[in-house]
Image (cartoon, rainbow, N blue to C red):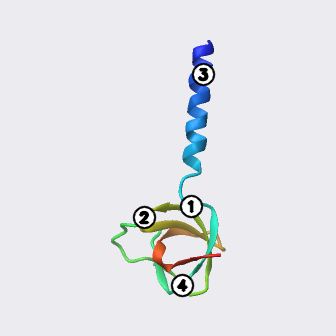
């Protein structure tokens, strides 16, 4: 029983550690230049249905290499290149 509890505890610690990766997770940012919001993912090949504009504020949810998953003030989620983000 102690062994099982130890494994569960180690798993929880691992998940907590993973949740904190990325230096811009769950932070606010401003869009530097007009950019398409890729709702289907960073590699979306179909045209984006919406555009974020210079000065728009977003919440950065996660960073994946050169792309960030963001949420707009009106709760739309999608991906934009990290190069267009200015931390607030």
The alpha-carbon separation of the residues under discs 2 and 1 comes to 20 Å
Residue bearing mark 2? 41
Above or below, comparing residue 22 to residue 82 in the picture: above
Q: Which disc is residue 23 wearing? A: 1
Earlier sequence position, callout 2 versus callout 4: 4
**In the rendered structure, are the residues bearing label 1 and label 3 in contact, judged by CB atoms less than 8 Å apart?**
no
Task: Answer yes or no: is residue 81 visible.
Answer: no
The x and y percentages for residue 85 are 53, 77
Nearest to the observer: residue 43 or residue 82: 82
Q: Which residue is drawn at 37% across and 68% down?
A: 44
Element on which disc 2 rests: loop
Between the residue at mark 1 and the residue at mark 3, the CA separation in whole angstroms equals 30 Å
- Spatial CA span between label 2 and label 4: 20 Å
Q: Name the residue under label 4.
A: 32
> Of the residues under marks 4 and 1, which one precedes in the sequence?
1
User: Are the residues at dot 2 and dot 4 in contact (C-beta closer than 8 Å)?
Assistant: no
Element class at badge 3: helix
Lower position in the chain sequence, tag 2 or tag 1: 1
């Amino acid at each position: 029983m102690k062994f099982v509890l130890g494994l569960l505890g180690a798993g929880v610690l691992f998940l907590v550690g993973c949740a904190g990766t990325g230096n811009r997770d769950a932070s606010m940012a401003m869009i530097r230049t007009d950019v398409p919001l890729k709702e289907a993912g960073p590699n979306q090949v179909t045209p984006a249905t919406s555009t974020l504009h210079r000065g728009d504020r977003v919440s950065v949810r996660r960073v994946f290499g050169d792309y960030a998953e963001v949420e707009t003030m009106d709760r739309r989620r999608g991906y934009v290149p990290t190069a267009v983000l200015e931390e607030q």
